[in-house]
Image (cartoon, helix red, strand yellow):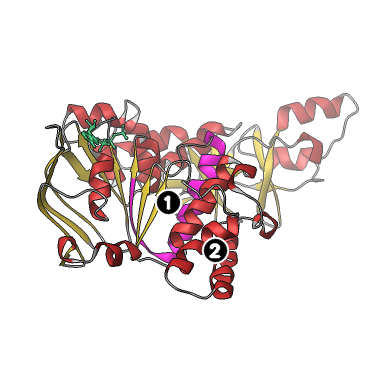
């Protein structure tokens, strides 16, 4: 654990970059420092590995005052990743990654073996090992930067805007892979970013800084979105915070409706007699394939078309949600479905039931302080005309 105790930093020209800062970055978790430009994030982070010396206060690493540790020893246990990766331009990719174990005195062969293992870990093909940084894309360079920071297997990683130098699509990929890697490695990580969306996606906890290095709020992403402590934080987090907060709220006891499902090749007359609605759900071995607009299929049958459900008439719109996720993905599934009913599936992908957008919205009354509704008496499990139902918590969306 990293602990800041009343830490301040005043630069020689009088600039107070950080003032009276106290917080903890827990072991094995990602703490994100976020805030507008110049608010002291980088200064805060660099005080952890003593690239910058605090003017007052203490920074403890696992209860040891970092000021008492030898700076080189301290840094050996702390990986450091910066924007644009900060690679050595005249060393190959492998040379860059292996440089850290080499510095630790490992023999060349062992260092390179470790380097290759790490390149694979961060998703870089082995044939890139012999290239120079300038021969890589921005995203590849960032991956090399992460691999290099991991090379000595440090328990702590500091990352300064690690994904900001790449385009938004690559950025998303890098963030996803980084989270997967962290799931395996469980490092204690401090990340600096100015991007609140990145903070919300990556952080186990988020420290929002105000100018002058003041900590405005330290909270989990869900708390930050639902309960910003003041107007500054609310503004910084953004106007759509209510909707984004739903991504962290379990759908809980929302009603899950049962409905008949049909198969490709089934006669339309048979489908019509069992259907509850004009839109019918088609499955294969219990797994949803798509929706069919029955009226359109029947009208085409009267004109000499197929009088059975045809694979070509499947509408693939809408997303699937699993039975253990968030209100936001449930709402997305219901709103994106051509039938107006979101399809919920079990872990094995088989059909569990459907959800209706209006009921998801009604269920929001149970989410405190999120969308301005403070009602706690909405019975989200109420009987509805769709038929039998069971409690559903629905989640991660996938294309249908
Ligand atoms: N070496 C220095 N000497 C004097 N002032 C400095 C020095 N380094 C940073 N500052 C000032 O300290 C304040 C905090 O800077 P810092 O780099 O920590 O902010 P930041 O939040 O990381 O900003 P950004 O998001 O723009 O990188 C700023 O006002 C900056 O101008």
Q: Which residue is mark 2?
A: 118
Which label number is shown at residue 393?
A: 1
77 up-or-down from 210: above or below: below
Residue 187 sits inside the magenta stretch: yes
Sequence-earlier tag: 1 or 2: 2
Q: Is residue 283 left or right of residue 100?
A: right
The quadrant where ligand 1 appears is top left
Q: Quadrant where the N terminus lies?
A: bottom left
Name the residue located 56 percent from the left edge and 32 percent from the top edge. 336
| Residue 186, image quadrant | bottom left
| Residue 183, image quadrant | bottom left
Q: Which residue is at the front of the view, 92 or 178?
A: 92
Q: Secondary structure at mark 2?
A: helix
Q: Residue 145 appears at what percent x and percent y? A: 49, 52
142 up-or-down from 233: above or below: below
173 up-or-down from 230: above or below: below
Name the residue located 85 percent from the left edge and 36 percent from the top edge. 307
Q: Residue 58 appears at what percent x and percent y? A: 12, 56
Q: Residue 236 appears at what percent x and percent y? A: 28, 29
Q: Is residue 110 visible?
A: yes
Q: Secondary structure at mark 1?
A: loop
Q: Residue 281 appears at what percent x and percent y? A: 65, 42
Name the residue located 60 percent from the left edge and 54 percent from the top edge. 92
Residue 267 sits inside the magenta stretch: no
Q: Which residue is at the front of the view, 277 or 85?
A: 85
359 up-or-down from 4: above or below: above
Dominant SS type (magenta): helix
Pointer 2 local density, CA inside 10 Å: few below 14, some 14–19, many at least 20: many
Exactly how many numbered labels are in the figure? Answer: 2
Pointer 1 local density, CA inside 10 Å: few below 14, some 14–19, many at least 20: many
Which label number is shown at residue 194?
A: none
């Amino acid at each position: 654990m990293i602990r800041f105790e009343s830490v301040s930093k005043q630069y020689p020209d009088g600039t107070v970059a950080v003032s009276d800062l106290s917080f903890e970055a827990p072991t094995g978790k990602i703490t994100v420092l976020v805030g507008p430009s110049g608010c002291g994030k980088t200064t805060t982070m660099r005080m952890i590995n003593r690239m910058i010396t605090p003017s007052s206060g203490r920074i403890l690493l696992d209860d040891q005052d970092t000021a008492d540790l030898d700076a080189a020893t301290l840094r050996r246990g702390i990986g450091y990743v910066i924007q644009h990766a900060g690679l050595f331009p005249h060393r190959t990719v492998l040379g860059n990654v292996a440089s850290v174990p080499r510095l630790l005195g490992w023999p060349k062969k062992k260092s390179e073996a470790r380097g290759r293992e790490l390149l694979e870990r961060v998703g870089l093909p082995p044939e890139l090992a012999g290239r120079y940084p300038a021969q890589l894309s921005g995203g590849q360079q960032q991956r090399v930067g992460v691999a290099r920071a991991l090379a000595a297997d440090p328990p702590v990683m500091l990352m300064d805007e690690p994904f900001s130098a790449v385009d938004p699509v690559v950025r998303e990929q890098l963030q996803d892979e980084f989270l997967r890697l962290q799931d395996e490695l469980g490092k204690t990580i401090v990340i600096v970013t100015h991007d609140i969306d990145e903070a919300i996606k990556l952080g186990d906890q988020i420290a929002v800084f105000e100018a002058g290095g003041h900590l405005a709020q330290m909270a989990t992403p869900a708390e930050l979105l639902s309960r910003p402590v003041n107007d500054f934080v609310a503004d910084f987090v953004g106007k759509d915070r209510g909707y984004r907060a739903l991504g962290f709220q379990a759908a809980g006891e929302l009603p899950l409706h049962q409905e008949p499902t049909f198969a490709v090749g089934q006669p339309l007359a048979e489908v019509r007699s069992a259907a509850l609605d004009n839109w019918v759900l088609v499955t294969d071995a219990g797994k949803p394939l798509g929706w069919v607009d029955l009226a359109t299929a029947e009208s085409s049958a009267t004109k000499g078309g197929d009088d059975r459900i045809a694979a070509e008439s499947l509408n693939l719109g809408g997303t699937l949600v699993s039975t253990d996720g968030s209100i936001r993905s449930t709402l997305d599934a219901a709103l994106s479905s051509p039938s107006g009913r979101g399809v919920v599936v079990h872990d094995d992908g088989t059909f569990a039931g459907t959800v209706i957008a209006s009921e998801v919205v009604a269920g929001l009354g149970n989410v405190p302080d999120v969308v301005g509704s403070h009602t706690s008496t909405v019975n989200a499990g109420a009987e509805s005309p769709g038929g039998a139902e069971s409690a559903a918590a629905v989640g991660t969306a996938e294309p249908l």
